[in-house]
Image (cartoon, rainbow, N blue to C red):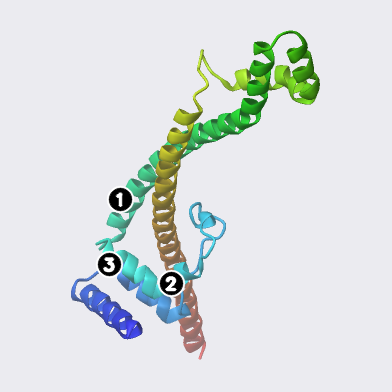
């Protein structure tokens, strides 16, 4: 059932494209006729390299759907689409990196605190005792107490500008940031995929133009040879 629906949708997309002349769609159709699929710009494709599964990008059907659903009707609008998406991708990349750094730091703080907290509790308990009780407690917790100076120093080295130890706040911030980070990452992946499609289509345009020029030159050479033979006869 779903296969039939997909076929109907694909046909509708193609019919819509045919009703209005679209130079991008015409180029894709010519490449499909020649090769059956689109070539991938493995070397020059900056965003293509970010896509792990590239088979879908070679599909002429997918390329046509990409062009139609985004209402791209010529190569000029494709270039504008690419420029806009490239700018958006850069914005996403900057924000994603910033939030990722904050997230990493908060996770590092939380991880360090998880190590430091029980040792700190042992140290505070030791400080609250006196006399024989303290001696006995310190002896029983010798290993933990010996770690306190180092862990305290490591904990403090992670804190910035008089920052306080606030594990509950860190946890809440981590949850919030993680959600934002993941959301931005998804949009970034989607945008990279769109840019990869644009790269593939532009690459195939250049390849087709080059192939047609070569064929034209070969045809002209052949005509010249034929003409010379006729003149010699």
How busy is the neighbourhood of tag 2: few (under 14 within 10 Å), some, or many (20 plus)? few
Is residue 77 visible in the rendered image? The answer is yes
Mark 2 touches mark 3? (CB < 8 Å): no
Question: Relative to 220, is 12 on the left or the right?
Answer: left
Identify the residue at horizontal 51%, vertical 87% (top origin). Answer: 229
State which tag comes first along the sequence, 1 or 2: 1
Residue position marked by numbered label 1 in the rendering: 80
**Category of crowding for the residue at label 1, using alpha-carbon neighbours closer than 10 angstroms: few (below 14), some (14–19), many (at least 20):** few
How far separated are the C-alphas under marks 2 and 3?
Answer: 25 Å
| The N terminus, quarter of image | bottom left
Q: Disc 3 on helix, strand or loop? A: helix
Tell me the distance, in whole angstroms, between the alpha carbons under discs 1 and 2: 26 Å
Label 1 sits on a secondary structure element that is helix
Q: Quadrant of residue 21?
A: bottom left
Find disc 3 in the rendering and name its residue. 68
Inter-mark Cα distance, 1 to 3: 15 Å
Q: Position of residue 89 (x, y in %)?
A: 40, 45
Total marks placed: 3
- Checking the image for residue 212, the label placed there is 2
In this view, the residue in front, 143 or 169, is 143
Nearer to the camera, 53 or 232 = 53
Q: Nearer the viewer, residue 13 or 186?
A: 186
**Labels 1 and 3: the sequence-earlier one:** 3
Outermost residue, left side: 19
Mark 1 or 2, closer to the camera: 1
Q: Nearer the viewer, mark 2 or mark 3?
A: 3
Few, some or many C-alpha atoms within 10 Å of disc 3 (few <14, some 14-19, many ≥20)? some
Which numbered tag is attached to residue 215?
A: none
- Compared with 18, 206 (above or below) is above
Q: Give the residue at the far top of this rendering.
A: 131
* In the depicted structure, whether residue 3 falls above or below residue 76: below
Q: Does residue 38 appear in the picture of this structure?
A: no
């Amino acid at each position: 059932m779903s296969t039939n629906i997909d076929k109907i949708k694909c046909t509708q997309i193609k019919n819509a494209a045919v009703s209005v002349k679209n130079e991008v769609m015409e180029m894709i159709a010519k490449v499909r006729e020649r090769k059956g699929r689109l070539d991938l710009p493995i070397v020059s494709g900056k965003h293509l390299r970010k896509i792990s599964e590239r088979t879908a990008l070679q599909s002429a059907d997918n390329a046509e759907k990409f062009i139609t659903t985004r209402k791209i009707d010529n190569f000029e609008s494709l270039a504008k689409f690419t420029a806009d998406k490239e700018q958006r991708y850069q914005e996403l990349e900057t924000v994603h990196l910033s939030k990722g750094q904050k997230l990493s730091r908060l996770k590092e703080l939380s991880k360090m605190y998880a190590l430091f907290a029980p040792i700190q509790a042992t140290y505070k308990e030791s400080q609250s005792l006196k006399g024989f009780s303290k001696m006995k407690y310190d002896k029983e917790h010798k290993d933990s107490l010996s770690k306190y100076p180092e862990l305290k120093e490591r904990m403090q080295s992670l804190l910035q500008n008089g920052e306080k130890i606030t594990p509950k706040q860190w946890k809440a911030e981590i949850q919030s940031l993680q959600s934002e980070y993941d959301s931005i990452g998804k949009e970034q992946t989607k945008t990279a995929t769109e840019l990869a499609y644009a790269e593939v289509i532009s690459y195939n345009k250049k390849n087709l133009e080059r192939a047609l020029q070569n064929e034209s030159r070969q045809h002209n050479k052949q005509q010249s040879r034929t003409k010379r033979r006729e003149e010699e006869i």
